[in-house]
Image: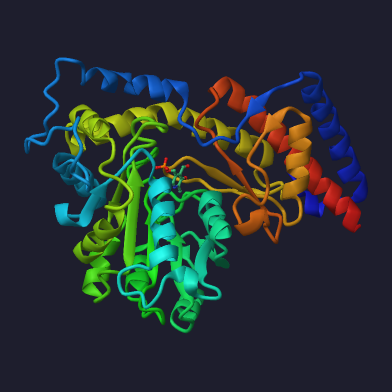
Amino acid sequence: MKRYQDMTAKELADAKAVLLERYQKFKDMKLSLNIARGNPSVQQLDMIMPMMDVINSDTDCRDKYGTDARNYGALLGLQEAREFFGELLGTKLEETIVVGASSINFMYDCLSRAMLKGVLGSDKPWGKYDKIKFICPVPGYDRHFGMCEFFGIDMIQVQTDEEGPDMDVIRKYVENDETVKGMWCIPKFSNPLGITYSDRVVKELANLKPAAKDFRIFWDNSYMVHHIYGDVQLLNILDECKKAGNPDMVYMFGSTSKITMAGSGIGFFGASEANIKFTESQVKYETISWDKMNMLRHVRFLKSQGGVENVMKKHAEILRPKFDAVFRVLSRELEGKGAGTWTRPKGGYFITFMANDGTATRINELVKACGVTMTGPGATHPFHHDPDDRYLRIAPSFPPVEELEPAMEVFAVCAQIATIEQLEAKA
Ligand SMILES: Cc1ncc(COP(=O)(O)O)c(C=O)c1O
């Protein structure tokens, strides 16, 4: 198959006519398909339902250290849960806090406290500066960017490749501007690219010499155990920061949202012991304790790190055919045609389609008119603006394969139509 870019005007017109006929057929089917939501499927959630049975009215609700999960107390989380999720994060008990259902909630909370009061080592609250800035690797996660937008934090976009974000650019900003106070990272099976930071990138991040002595890396490790085709190793950034003499530079976040239940999981936070003590000194004003019964339920259901691995294998078995379906349709329809490229992540929740520059919005319009909903173009960038109009995020987890296949066919047809339209407009 010839690339569209190599075709004559006549060949392009013929190809477009065939595609438009297919497009019309899809339109006539009045589809209603959704590949926008990175939610676990009903099947995945059903698989977790036995977790609901590990606690009932006969249960002894004390953890192994005797703390009654029903009562107030244990501000940093049930010790048993702190040990369990600390092991997952790679942190010790004194370096771990187990919180409520959402890690995003705790990221927001950390940022909000930093704005109001500062972090350990701050001369003044971040909110007292005229402007502060965050490094935002792109493409990235809209909720991270949304938080910066909400707090009026300037976002410095840094391009990401398969090893992680561009470290030369990051060093230039972080080491020369003391108003650069933080950075977002999704280090493993990232949203949306699915890449995992290389050892070099993790070490270089840990060895940064920030101009701001209260600079923090927000290390959102949401997909730390979410492999689908095989695991990929990620260095422990806290260990690397300690080796580099920067133990307080990183805040690590994780949750069980995509291990157990997205709406009723457990969030956790890891950082240096000094950061944990400092965080405790602030957090004690906002709550007496988080939901310890849910912590108990999780620890008793998951049992061990091996238990986590078993659950993740079951998730992978459900997710793999869906990712396979997306790769199959994209390869069959688009391989070698010059209508865009796509990522092939080993895990996580997303596949990213890199459209020809300037066509992502048009693809989304065409797809939408056919009854297929996808994450809007621009969602991968601050202020929902992708300057190259290139990135489209595909979320295969929620719909069944029978819906995913036609949705992806529609998508592939639309990507080709948009490519031809652009070539014709340029001619
Ligand atoms: C990168 C990233 N962080 C955090 C979350 C949500 O985490 P939580 O459910 O723990 O708030 C998501 C969910 O899609 C995500 O993709």
Q: Is residue 274 visible?
A: yes
Quarter containing the N terminus: top right
In the displayed structure, does residue 370 sit left or right of residue 393?
Answer: right
In the displayed structure, does residue 369 sit left or right of residue 89?
Answer: right
> Which percent across, then down, holds residue 289?
25, 42
Q: What residue sits 45% from the left and 80% below the top? A: 178
In the displayed structure, does residue 186 sit left or right of residue 371?
Answer: left
Q: Quadrant of residue 149?
A: bottom right
Q: What residue sits 39% from the left and 38% below the top? A: 228
Q: What residue sits 50% from the left and 78% below the top? A: 173
> Which quarter holds ligand 1?
top left
> From what the image shows, is residue 205 above or below residue 388?
below
In the displayed structure, does residue 248 sit left or right of residue 385?
Answer: left
> From what the image shows, is residue 242 above or below residue 380?
below
> Which percent across, then down, holds residue 2?
76, 47
The furthest residue to the bottom: 176
Q: Nearer the viewer, residue 9 or 191?
A: 191
The furthest residue to the front: 285
Q: Number of marks in the image? A: 0
Q: Nearer the viewer, residue 166 or 178?
A: 178
Quarter containing the C terminus: bottom right
Q: Quadrant of residue 417?
A: top right
> Which percent across, then down, holds residue 27?
80, 24
